[in-house]
C-alpha cells in the first residue's frame, strides 16, 4: 500500500495525477500525458485556493471549466470525469484541516460553477466555430456542418449527463430546456416542465432578496447569484436546493438566456432541522429546554414599548422522595406526566412551557395584559397538579411551589428575571409549598444579600474581618463588674458592621460556625487573661468571659479538646470561662449531647442556660443539665418597663429565681435598660444583669475602665 503524501504540494500533485489519468483518455490533444498533467496543475491550484478561501468565489470554478474547453477537453465524458474527480478527491487532498462538511458544500458549488463555465465556454466555442464555419462555408460546407453537429452533440451530452439539475430559460422566465436530473428532483415529465415560467416557483420561505437578485440578473445588471431556495413539488412536498443562476450572453454581449444549476439539499436540511430540534428540546419530556427558553425570554424582554411578560417558575415539592423511594425511572415517568399537564396549561398565543432541568419548569406568557394572564396561568398550573399521577400502580400526589415575576419589557435581563423567579419560588417553598408567590424586589434584595454574605463567609475569617465587642455583666447587689459577654461582629467591606443576627445562621448552615466559634473562644479567653492581669490577678476578683455556643458546636467532637487547649495556651483557669447554651438547643437532649458539657463543667467551666423561659422546657430537667447559671430571656425585663410591673410576671421571675437558687444556680438577666428594672430585679433576688443601662457592647478597654471605677469607687 502506498503511503499518503506528506505536504500540501504532494497532495495537490497526487490530485492532478488522478485527474489527468481520468481525463486524458477522452481528450483530443497532441500532448503526452505528463505534459497534459502539467497543463492541469495550475487549474488544480485554482480549485484548491477556491476551496480554502475565506469567501467563496464562483468565478474560479467557472474559469477552470472554461480552461478545460481551452485545453481541448471538450468531450462530454471529459467534463463528467472531471466532476467525478473533483467530487471524490478535491476535499480529500486539498481540504486541509478546515470543517469538511463546509468544504463538501463548497466543493459542490465549485462543481456547479465548473459546469456553468464549461457550458458557457463550450457555447462560446460553438459560436466561434459556427462563425468560422460561416466564413469558410463556400470552401468546406460539409466540414462546417459536421463540426456543428459534433459541438451540439457534445453540449447535449454534457447537459443530459450532469448529476446536478440544469435548466435554461429565456429572459422572460419561460423554461426552454431541462435535463433529466432536474426532472427527477421535481418529479415532473419534460412535457410538464417545459412552458412553465420561473416566476411560478415562489415559496413562503423565499429569502427577501431572492426575486430582487433575479430581476437584476435578467436586466443584465449581474452575471450570477447563489442562494438557498425551496420549491413545491406537484405532490405538495418541498424541495430544498442550493440554486445558482447565471446569465448567458450572445456574441455581442447582450443578455440572451438564464442558466440554473440546482443541488438537492432536502435531506441535509431535514437533518439540520432534526439536530436543531434535539439541541433545543428536552430529551425526556419533549418540552423546550433551557437554551430555547432563554431565546424566547430574551425576545420577550426585547419587545417593543407597551409589551410585558409574565413568568412562572415551578419546582415540584418532595420530588427527591419519589426518586429515592421508587427509583429514577418512576421519577422520569412522573416528570413526563407533569410536562404533559403543564403543556396543556399554556396553549394561548404568546405562552410556552419549558423544562430547565430536574423537576424545575417555567411557563412564559407575553403581551400587554400579563398581570392578569400570569396569575391565571399559575392558577391553571396549580389546578393541573391536583389530580394524583399513577406511576407503577401507585397514585402519587404532586404539589409544586411557583415563583411569579411580571413586568414591562426592556427593564431586566433574562438572567435577572430568572434569578428573581428562582428566589420567589424558594420563598413559596419556605412558606410550606403548594402555593405561588409574587416577586418582591425587597425580598429579592435580601436574598441576594444573604447569598453574597454566605459566599463571602469562608474567606472573611481568613481576611480578619471579624472582631469582638464585650458587654459587661454587672452584680446587682454591689454594682461591680463581674465579667462580660463576648459578641462577635463582622466588619463587611460593603455592608459595614454586621451583628450576629445577620450571619450566625449562615455560618451554621455552611459549617463555618465551628472555626468561627473556635476563633471567638480563643480571642475571648486571651482577652480574659489580659483583664485579669490588668485588674490585679486572680485574688483581686477575677473577671469572667461568657462565650456563646451554637448547636453545631455542641455536637462537634472536638469541643472539649479545643476548649482545654485554648485555656492552657492562654494560661487561664477554667473558672474564668462561661459557655452559654440556648435553652432550645438542650430541650430533649440525650446523654451523648450532654456528655461534653458535663466534662467541661467538671473541669470548672461554668455552663449558662441562655434565653431561659423561651424553650418551654420542663423545669425538672434542670436537675440533669450540667448548668450553673440561668440566663433569663429579655422578655422578662421588658414587662418591667412600666410601673407598676405586671404582678404575674413578677411572681414568675420570683419563682424562677427561687427555684434556681434552691438548685444552687446563679441567675443572670438580659435586656436591663432602666434603673427601675435593675432595682426590681435586685429585689427579686437576681444575681447579675447586663443591658444598655450599664453599657452597650464595646471594645475590651471599656470593660477595664468600668472595672477600675468599681474598684476605686
Image (cartoon, grey):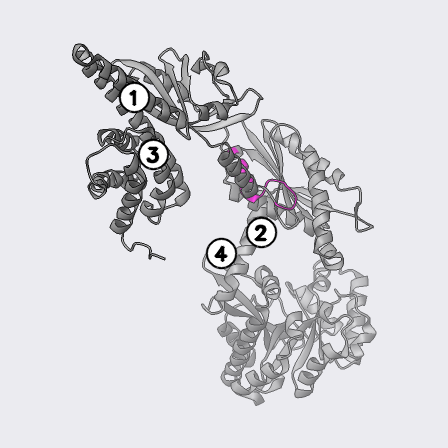
- Depth order, front residue of 253/216: 253
- Depth order, front residue of 375/449: 375
Q: Please name the residue that numbered disc 1 is placed on.
A: 150
Q: CA distance from mark 1 to mark 2?
A: 86 Å
Within 10 Å of disc 4 (Cα), the crowding (few <14, some 14-19, many 20+) is few
Q: Earlier along the polypeptide chain: callout 1 or callout 2?
A: 1
Q: Mark 1 or 2, which is nearer the eye?
A: 1
Where disc 2 sits, the SS reads helix
What span is colored magenta in the figure? 283-299
Q: Mark 3 or 2, which is nearer the eye?
A: 3
Where disc 4 sits, the SS reads loop
Q: Earlier along the polypeptide chain: callout 3 or callout 2?
A: 3
- Find residue 647 and report its image quarter: bottom right
Is any atom of residue 241 visible in this view?
yes
Query: How far across and how far down the image is residue 618, in percent?
Result: 82, 70
Q: Earlier along the polypeptide chain: callout 1 or callout 4?
A: 1
Q: Which mark is residue 215?
A: none
Q: Please name the residue that numbered disc 2 is placed on.
A: 447
Give the residue at x 38% y 10%: 172
Q: Quadrant of the N terminus?
A: bottom left
Q: CA distance from mark 3 to mark 1?
A: 27 Å
Q: Which mark is residue 495?
A: 4
Q: Earlier along the polypeptide chain: callout 3 or callout 1?
A: 3
Q: Please name the residue that numbered disc 3 is placed on.
A: 110
- Depth order, front residue of 160/133: 133
Amino acid at each position: 500500500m502506498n503511503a499518503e503524501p506528506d505536504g500540501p504540494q504532494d497532495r495537490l500533485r497526487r490530485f492532478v495525477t488522478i485527474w489527468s489519468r481520468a481525463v486524458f483518455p477522452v481528450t483530443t490533444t497532441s500532448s503526452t500525458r505528463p505534459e497534459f498533467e502539467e497543463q492541469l496543475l495550475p487549474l488544480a491550484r485554482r480549485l484548491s485556493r477556491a476551496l480554502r478561501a475565506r469567501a467563496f468565489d464562483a468565478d474560479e470554478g467557472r474559469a477552470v471549466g472554461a480552461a478545460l474547453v481551452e485545453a481541448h477537453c471538450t468531450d462530454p465524458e471529459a467534463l463528467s470525469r472531471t466532476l467525478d474527480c473533483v467530487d471524490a478527491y478535491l476535499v480529500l487532498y486539498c481540504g486541509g484541516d478546515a470543517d469538511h462538511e463546509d468544504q463538501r458544500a463548497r466543493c459542490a458549488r465549485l462543481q456547479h460553477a465548473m459546469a456553468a463555465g464549461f457550458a458557457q465556454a463550450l457555447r462560446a466555442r460553438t459560436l466561434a466555430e459556427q462563425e468560422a464555419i460561416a466564413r469558410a462555408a463556400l470552401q468546406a460546407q460539409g466540414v462546417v456542418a459536421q463540426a456543428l453537429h459534433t459541438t451540439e452533440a457534445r453540449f447535449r451530452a454534457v447537459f443530459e449527463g450532469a448529476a446536478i439539475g440544469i435548466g435554461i430559460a429565456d429572459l422572460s422566465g419561460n423554461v426552454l430546456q431541462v435535463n433529466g436530473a432536474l426532472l427527477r428532483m421535481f418529479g415532473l415529465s419534460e412535457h410538464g416542465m417545459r412552458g412553465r415560467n420561473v416566476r411560478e416557483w415562489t415559496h413562503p420561505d423565499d429569502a427577501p432578496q431572492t426575486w430582487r437578485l433575479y430581476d437584476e440578473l435578467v436586466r443584465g445588471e449581474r452575471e450570477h447569484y447563489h442562494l438557498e431556495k425551496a420549491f413545491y413539488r406537484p405532490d405538495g412536498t418541498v424541495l430544498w436546493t442550493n440554486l445558482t443562476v447565471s446569465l448567458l450572453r450572445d456574441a455581442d454581449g447582450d443578455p440572451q438566456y438564464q442558466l440554473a444549476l440546482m443541488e438537492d439539499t432536502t435531506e441535509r436540511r431535514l437533518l439540520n432541522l432534526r439536530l436543531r430540534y434535539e439541541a433545543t428540546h428536552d430529551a425526556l419530556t419533549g418540552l423546550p429546554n433551557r437554551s430555547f427558553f432563554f431565546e424566547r425570554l430574551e425576545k420577550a424582554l426585547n419587545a417593543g414599548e407597551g409589551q410585558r411578560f409574565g413568568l412562572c417558575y415551578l419546582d415540584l415539592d418532595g420530588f427527591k422522595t419519589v426518586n429515592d423511594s421508587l427509583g429514577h425511572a418512576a421519577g422520569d415517568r412522573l416528570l413526563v406526566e407533569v410536562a404533559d399537564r403543564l403543556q396543556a396549561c399554556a396553549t394561548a398565543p404568546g405562552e410556552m412551557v419549558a423544562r430547565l432541568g430536574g423537576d424545575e419548569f417555567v411557563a412564559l406568557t407575553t403581551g400587554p395584559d400579563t398581570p392578569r394572564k400570569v396569575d391565571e396561568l399559575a392558577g391553571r398550573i396549580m389546578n393541573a397538579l391536583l389530580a394524583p399521577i399513577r406511576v407503577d400502580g401507585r397514585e402519587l400526589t404532586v404539589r409544586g411551589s411557583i415563583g411569579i415575576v411580571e413586568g414591562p419589557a426592556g427593564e431586566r435581563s433574562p438572567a435577572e428575571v430568572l434569578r428573581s423567579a428562582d428566589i420567589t419560588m424558594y420563598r413559596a417553598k419556605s412558606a410550606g409549598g403548594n402555593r405561588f408567590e409574587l416577586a418582591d424586589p425587597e425580598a429579592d434584595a435580601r436574598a441576594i444579600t444573604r447569598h453574597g454574605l454566605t459566599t463571602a463567609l469562608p474567606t472573611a475569617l481568613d481576611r480578619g474581618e471579624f472582631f469582638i465587642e464585650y458587654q459587661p455583666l454587672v452584680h446587682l447587689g454591689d454594682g461591680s463588674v463581674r465579667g462580660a459577654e463576648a459578641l462577635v461582629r463582622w466588619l463587611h467591606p460593603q455592608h459595614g458592621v454586621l451583628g450576629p443576627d445577620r450571619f450566625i445562621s449562615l455560618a451554621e448552615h455552611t459549617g463555618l460556625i465551628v472555626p468561627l466559634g473556635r476563633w471567638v473562644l480563643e480571642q475571648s479567653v486571651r482577652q480574659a487573661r489580659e483583664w485579669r492581669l490588668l485588674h490585679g490577678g486572680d485574688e483581686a476578683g477575677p473577671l469572667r468571659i461568657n462565650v456563646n455556643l451554637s448547636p453545631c458546636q455542641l455536637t462537634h467532637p472536638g469541643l472539649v479538646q479545643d476548649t482545654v487547649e485554648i485555656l492552657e495556651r492562654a494560661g487561664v483557669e477554667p473558672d474564668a470561662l462561661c459557655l452559654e447554651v440556648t435553652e432550645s438547643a438542650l430541650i430533649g437532649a440525650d446523654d451523648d449531647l450532654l456528655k461534653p458539657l458535663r466534662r467541661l463543667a467538671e473541669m470548672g467551666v461554668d455552663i449558662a442556660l441562655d434565653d431561659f423561659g423561651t424553650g418551654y422546657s420542663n423545669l425538672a430537667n434542670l436537675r440533669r443539665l450540667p448548668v450553673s447559671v440561668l440566663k433569663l430571656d429579655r422578655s422578662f425585663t421588658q414587662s418591667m418597663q412600666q410601673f407598676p410591673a405586671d404582678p404575674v410576671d413578677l411572681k414568675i421571675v420570683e419563682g424562677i429565681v427561687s427555684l434556681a437558687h434552691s438548685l444552687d444556680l446563679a441567675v443572670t438577666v438580659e435586656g436591663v435598660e432602666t434603673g427601675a428594672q435593675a432595682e426590681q430585679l435586685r429585689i427579686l433576688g437576681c444575681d447579675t444583669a447586663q443591658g444598655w443601662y450599664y453599657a452597650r457592647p464595646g471594645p475590651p478597654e471599656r470593660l477595664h475602665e468600668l472595672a477600675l471605677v468599681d474598684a476605686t469607687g
